[in-house]
Image (cartoon, rainbow, N blue to C red):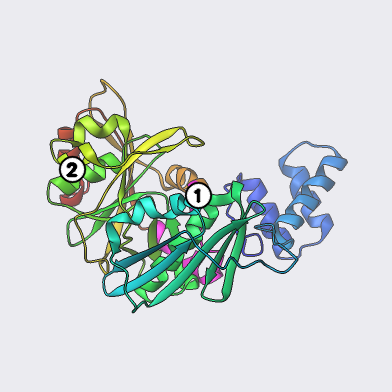
Amino acid sequence: MENQNQYLIVSPIFAKILQMVAEKKSTEEITSCITSAVDITDEHRRVLLLHCKNLLFTPKKIQAKITNEHPRIQSYTTSKYYKINDTILLVAFCSAYETALIHPKFAHLEVEPTSKTDFQYQIFTSNDIIHLYNNTELIDVWHQKDSHVFQGKFSMKIIEHMHDYKEDKWMGILHASAVSNHRECILFLGASGNGKSTSLALLQAHGYTCLADDFVPILAKNKEVYSYPSAISIKKNSLLVLLPYYPELQNSAEYKYEKLGKTVRYLPPRNRDYKQHAPCNKLVFIKYSKNTDARIKEISLFDALEQLVPDSWLSPKASNAAAFLDWFTGLTCYQLTYSNNQKMIAIVENIFTYEL
């Protein structure tokens, strides 16, 4: 629903009603459809119809905009310079709060200050509102409670600079980890703590390439997954597993995210060619489960979509949505449960090589 900038997974009857509303069918036709499918009162039918119309035709106010003149901070406590391929970004932070929202994942890209920069950003918070500027142009504002949306917007700006495609050219950003064998890639999906990033780090140690972690962009034009340069987030309970492969994690900085209830360290990807992209035709919904024998099974596209949509950003642009559905219907999707890392690696190698 482009007006709403959101996707919903609904029952077939609700989808049918939405379609009839979008086609401007008469109230009588829609009411008849509802009556034939479900036994509800006239009042409930009226409310359902009104709800469908609101979903389709009432634009969603995504964020609270500030109506008065936006303040500008003249001094910043910290400035960071980041190099991504041949692009230099200068990001000025007003305080430690804003720095903590961005810098930890990109610290491995930091370079010495230089007079030559390609893009300059300023970030500050005033009256609980986060402001993001590109030079003198205000990009947007967010309440602090929506800081994750701000982080997503900043990440999208990085993607635009890296790959020279504006936001309206991307069909989606998936909360996933993308691992490549230099010909194609596989996406790991699943709830936080299920092992996406740990599996990605282990596979990287075994010769695979980390294309992206947590923020996986897919271009509408060719339906391929593109590189994203942030570090891999490693939770505390994964350290013992990964230290033999990455001893540098022992002394790396630790970040506590109290609201999310997690403590992480950041592992720089070994891939430094951030122009890479690869086709993807396999999704793996991964879950680490202690003392469980490794098992993998193919799951339906509907089950996969039901898990994917709530945790992803999908473009509301009609042509991009069509590209996403075309890509998604060609996927093979799996559920992988494991406790033994070596077995997980062997299974992923087989997924790359064969259709299981």
Label 1 or label 2, whichever comes before in sequence order: 1
**Which label sits on residue 248?**
2
Q: What secondary structure is found at the residue carrying circle 2? A: helix
The crowding category of the residue bearing disc 2, from other C-alpha atoms within 10 Å (few below 14, some 14 to 19, many at least 20), is few
Mark 1–mark 2 CB contact (< 8 Å): no
The crowding category of the residue bearing disc 1, from other C-alpha atoms within 10 Å (few below 14, some 14 to 19, many at least 20), is few
Residue 224 is covered by the magenta coloring: no
Q: Which residues are magenta?
A: 311-329
Q: Which quarter shows the C terminus?
A: top left
Q: Residue at x 77, y 54 (%)?
A: 30
Question: For residue 216, what is the image quadrant?
Answer: bottom left
Q: What count of labels does the image hold?
A: 2
Instruction: Compare residues 133 and 52 and report the one nearer the observer.
Output: 133
Q: Which residue is mark 1?
A: 97
Q: Residue at x 13, y 36 (%)?
A: 244
Asked if residue 242 can be seen in this view, the reply is: yes
**Label 1 is placed on what type of residue?**
Tyr
Where is residue 83 shown, x and y percent of the image?
30, 68
**Label 2 is placed on what type of residue?**
Glu
Residue 316 is covered by the magenta coloring: yes
